[in-house]
Image (cartoon, helix red, strand yellow):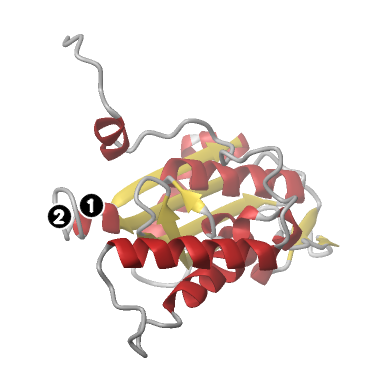
Amino acid sequence: MSNTPLDNDDILDDHVASSYDTPLRPDAFEMDDELKKELIAKHFKEIMQILGMDLTDDSLAGTPRRVAKMYVEEVFSGLNPKNKPKARLFENKFGYNQMLVEKDITFYSHCEHHFVPIYGKAHVAYISSGEVIGLSKINRIVQYYSKRPQVQERLTVQIANELRKVLKTEDVGVVIDANHMCVSSRGVGDTNSKTGTAHFSGKFLEEKYKNEFLNYINSPGNGMV
């Protein structure tokens, strides 16, 4: 084994995640959104100028502000806990005690190492402990944790942890298949590979439930098999 220390470029190209919590400063939300957008626009304008872009051009003049608005209000809006979806539970009146699967949830995120897109599909399953959640809320939970700088492993676990907390059940499974632009548009330039991650807890650690879930999300049809 080599004793040569790795620099940051080596580490980040190896897709390292530091923890399952998104790295945030304690004062991350003391600054209001309008000031954040103002400062981001200012600094992004400087980046564009350093790159040699002519910001007097009509096409570029509004870009710093557009990028700032996009960062704060859209693609990184999941950083702010005030945007977390409110998940209302309903009594499981039907007594349904099998797994419920929400398949092919499209998500868009950003790699925290290069700030380029990660996009793909999330598949979520749970077994009710007595209460159920509206289907759209599952999608919203996936979107919320996607809309922040991420690594795929962390995203998978954050979605699973939130579902366990909201649904009050340990019986949760999450599988994500994603494309990483940091792999396809730069670096190795591989446009064909995908990355898969999974997190299982409760009954989904048992082969019976895990295989039923995996078989369903990998089947071309829409019905349980």
* x then y, percent, for residue 125: 57, 54
Between the C-alphas of marks 1 and 2, the distance is 6 Å
- Dot 1 corresponds to which residue? 183
Q: Residue furthest bottom?
A: 58
Q: Residue at x 52, y 57 (%)?
A: 146
Quadrant containing the C terminus in the rendered view: bottom left
Q: Residue at x 52, y 34 (%)?
A: 206
Q: Is residue 143 left or right of residue 181?
A: right
Residue 193 versus residue 170 in the image, above or below: below
Q: Residue at x 51, y 49 (%)?
A: 174
Q: Secondary structure at mark 1?
A: helix
* x then y, percent, for residue 37: 60, 67
Q: Secondary structure at mark 2?
A: loop
Q: Is residue 146 left or right of residue 88?
A: left
Quadrant containing the N terminus in the rendered view: top left
Q: Quadrant of residue 170?
A: top right
Q: In this rendering, does residue 2 appear at all?
A: yes
Q: Amino acid at mark 2?
A: Asp
- Dot 2 corresponds to which residue? 190
